[in-house]
């Protein structure tokens, strides 16, 4: 019984740590589906756009159905704990449709899943487990 209580406490503490870490990170999803996570440092829209010519940064929280996605100005700072999309400028000139929002949601889900899988793979390697097998030296 004591082990069960200890395990539950560890799960709660782990969830709190994850929630506080998520509040510190800015996630930016690019048109090619990759996601960059920025911790600690301040980040402007201009910096997030490096290497993405002809694109704009949009906050996922500000996107609405049947409305044009509001874009951030180059000097605007991204907020911690927020998700952003880098969209082609042409996509910001027309109202978002339901299929547009669904496509962005699927892209964000896939990017976050890949990020989690990479993190888990890194932990397993650090702990001596690779592809489900523990290495013994």
Image (tube, grey):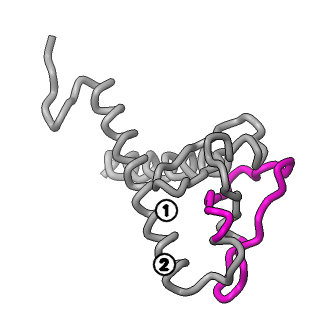
Q: Which residues are magenta?
A: 62-90
Of label 1 and label 2, which has the lower sequence position?
2
Front-most of 96 and 91?
91
Secondary structure, mark 1, is: helix
Which quarter of the rendered picture does the C terminus lie within? top left
Q: Residue at x 64, y 86 (%)?
A: 65
Question: Residue 114, how many percent across, how many down?
Answer: 38, 50
Q: CA distance from mark 1 to mark 2?
A: 10 Å
Above or below, comparing residue 98 to residue 50 in the picture = below
Q: Quadrant of residue 61?
A: bottom right
The residue positioned 33% from the left and 52% from the top of the image is: 4
Q: Can you give x and y, in whole percent of width and height, for residue 43 in the image?
A: 75, 41
- Residue lying furthest top: 137
Magenta residue check for 95: no
> Dot 1: few (<14), some (14–19), or many (≥20) neighbours within 10 Å?
many
Relative placement, left or right, of 96 versus 8 is right
Residue corresponding to mark 2: 102
Closer to the camera in the image, 26 or 124: 26
- Vertical relation: 64 (above or below) 46: below
Looking at the rendered structure, the number of numbered marks drawn on it comes to: 2
**In the rendering, at what x and y percent does residue 123 appear?**
35, 32
Kindly identify the residue that appears in the image at 68 percent across and 80 percent down: 94
Q: How many other residues sit within 10 Å of disc 2, few (<14), some (14-19) or many (≥20)?
A: few
Q: Which residue is mark 1?
A: 108
Vertical arrangement, residue 66 with respect to residue 36, above or below: below
């Amino acid at each position: 019984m004591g082990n069960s209580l200890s395990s539950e406490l560890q799960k709660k503490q782990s969830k709190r740590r994850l929630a506080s870490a998520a509040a510190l990170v800015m996630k930016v999803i690019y048109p090619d589906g990759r996601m960059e996570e920025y911790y600690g440092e301040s980040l402007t829209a201009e910096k997030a756009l490096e290497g993405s010519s002809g694109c704009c940064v949009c906050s996922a929280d500000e996107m609405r159905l049947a409305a044009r996605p509001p874009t951030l100005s180059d000097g605007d700072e991204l907020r911690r704990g927020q998700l952003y999309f880098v969209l082609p400028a042409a996509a910001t000139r027309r109202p978002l449709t339901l299929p547009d929002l669904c496509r962005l949601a699927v892209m964000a889900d896939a990017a976050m899943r890949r990020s989690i899988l990479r993190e888990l793979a890194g932990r397993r390697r650090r702990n001596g487990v690779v592809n489900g097998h523990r290495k013994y030296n």
